[in-house]
Amino acid sequence: MKNKVLYTINKSELDKLIGILQRDGYRVVGPTVRDGAITYEEIESVRQLPIGWTDSQSPGRYRLNRRNDDHLFGYVVGPHSLKKFFFPPKQRLFGIKRDGESGYIFEAHQPDPPRYAFLGVRACDLAAVGVQDRVFKQTMAEPYYAKARNDALFIAVNCTEPGGTCFCGSMGTGPRCSEGFDLALTELRTTFTVEVGTNKGRQLIEALEHETTDANTSHLVDLLMDNAAEHMGRTLDTEDLPDILLKNLSHDHWNEVAKRCMSCSNCTFACPTCFCSNVEDSTDLSGNHAERWRTWGSCFTLEFSYHTGGYSRSTPAARYRQWLTHKLANWHEQFGTSGCVGCGRCITWCPVGIDITKEATTIANDVKRSRANQEAKRLEEVGS
Amino acid sequence: MISTLDQRPSIVCGEANPMAPAWTRIVACQQESSNTASYTLQFLDPEQKKNYRFQPGQFNMVYLFGVGEAAISISSDPDKCDSLVHTIRHVGSVTFAMNRLGIGQCVGLRGPFGSSWPLQECRGRDILLVAGGIGIAPLRPAIYQLLKNRDDYGRLILLYGIRSPQDMIFKEEVEGWMDRRDFQVLITVDYPSDEWTGPVGVVTKLLRRVRVDSSRTSVFVCGPRVMNRAAAHSFLSHYVPEDEIFISLERNMRCGVGQCGHCQYGPKFVCKDGPVFSYASVRNLFGKDEV
């Protein structure tokens, strides 16, 4: 990774880049300040980026603050991920009308997605797209997702200043973007260094005024990345974690978390990999037109698990346990990867500040401690 | 030869996307009990009608115009290719609405989805079927196949538990099976009528009346959760191996293809990894509450 060729561009080139993307028919999406948070929205120029802003994040808390410089990407991830662009929160799957004897006719289809170019995407969000790819592209491709995803372009940004709830270092997804990008920028004082990830990315850099980054600057970027990796707001020891969690479904701590969990679903909606959905069918008043909509769903709601035999998960403890064990353990068996990318959104946006790293660690430490005690006891018995 | 079991059939759905239904027409309707009816469906599209295949134990997502979708197992003979049957108990919004439909009306379908009873793998073995209530419906396609290829299997036993004698579905057919010498059928009821002379009580009590040779028996179970659990544990205590006990599970399902997340059962998506699981594959979850 460290020996990749980097290019340097002036910050002023970024507006040109946005222009090129627009000319190429892309809808450019980037971070912008909205309603007191930094969210991904459609942007038209660099001026809409959160210039000179940063964020301060801790469990259940998110605030924007002024920086003492004019950095364009001097913050980490906000409440929105890229999920909403590939897998919209609410989408019509089809509309149909009655057609006399021959049944029904489809009259409205899923819309075609726009071609998105994402600017300022972080390593954790790129990793999350990779995780969702495995969900939506396996078994039976989700057509909207597949198209939006295949057409998308990613101009990523390496995080040099991790936030208070970040733990991508523990999940192996960041802070440096390692795959899934067309271009990856690192922001310096007056310039960006640029790593090229794809041919499309190469064409873009060719169109900009650029030079090969000198060795000192390359080294500086490496130092910034190493420094970022060492300053994660949080850590999570993932060794043995799936096994520990799945073998301790009856651990007391699930009930302890449930005393604080409000089952509000915020974590699942903020999570960039959570993929559950509901399907809703309805008709108009004439009864001749019907539609099917898909909306984001959450395993934290009671009705999520309802079937004729009752509710599969009737308590908040069971629902929290489902979410956490799915994310950190069962995901591995389902999709060959963790479901957590370490973005920290579920921690920041939990109204009561429940911290996935802390809850998982509490259980893991307790289990490891009692395993160690048992082992010590066994050795003692063998010894005597 | 069980031709329909050779490979997993491809999924039939509507033109719009994988979440859109294909259309079928109700060509026959048979009331099975006070709240249960069997609907024979035929695809409107000749291609779909020709290509639709399923395996015993699989299900469809049944769509009612504007009302919604429900996961319903297929209860007909997989070799009968021109139509299929869903046996539906009217208990939820979709199935209640189904009650209002009659012959000639249209129903949407996506499917077939899920795993099936391991009929091929169990050749040569005794097959013991345990059904609770409507749980007989997803077992019926397997029974058709077992009877059709009767010589390929050892003893064939059905233990069928129902609430009361009036709740028996597939009544005439079950009586026909009872008359066969090569099929042992035992029925128990929770609430006997005055005329009932058979066993009373939970279905696992019937186990005392049959001989289970644990070394050569495969068990197929489908019923309410409590019954599934009791049955599985009874067979385990009869030394039937964990990988010879197969259970069909019920969960909330919205998509059928492992994308909506509702049916998750630990690492399993019941819609695509199930609904039929070997006990061995869900051992860690089976006894757990609220997973």
Image (tube, helix red, strand yellow):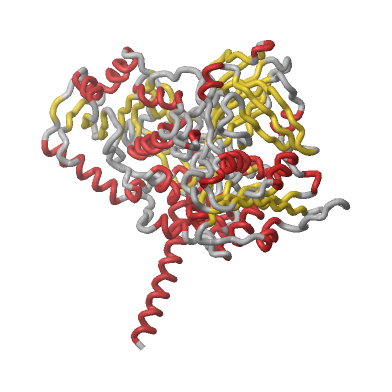
- Residue A363 appears in the picture as rendered: yes
- Residue B72 appears in the picture as rendered: no
Residue that lies at the very extreme toward the top in this rendered image? A100
Viewport quadrant of the N terminus of chain A: top left
Horizontal side of residue B226 vs B20, given as left or right: right
Closest to the observer: B105 or B54? B54
Residue A93: x and y in percent read 55, 23
Horizontal side of residue B206 vs A130, given as left or right: right
What count of labels does the image hold?
Answer: 0
- Determine which quarter of the picture holds residue B238: bottom right
Closest to the observer: A68 or A48? A48
Viewport quadrant of the C terminus of chain A: bottom left
Residue B117: x and y in percent read 53, 44
- Determine which quarter of the picture holds residue A40: top left
Horizontal side of residue A288 vs A237, given as left or right: right
Q: Residue at x 28, y 51 (%)?
A: A230
Closest to the observer: A78 or A379? A379
Residue B132: x and y in percent read 68, 49
Query: Please, is residue A23 above or below residue B6 in the view?
Result: above
Closest to the observer: B214 or B270? B214
Query: Please, is residue A283 above or below residue A324 in the view?
Result: above
Residue B78: x and y in percent read 56, 33
Horizontal side of residue A218 vs B253, given as left or right: left
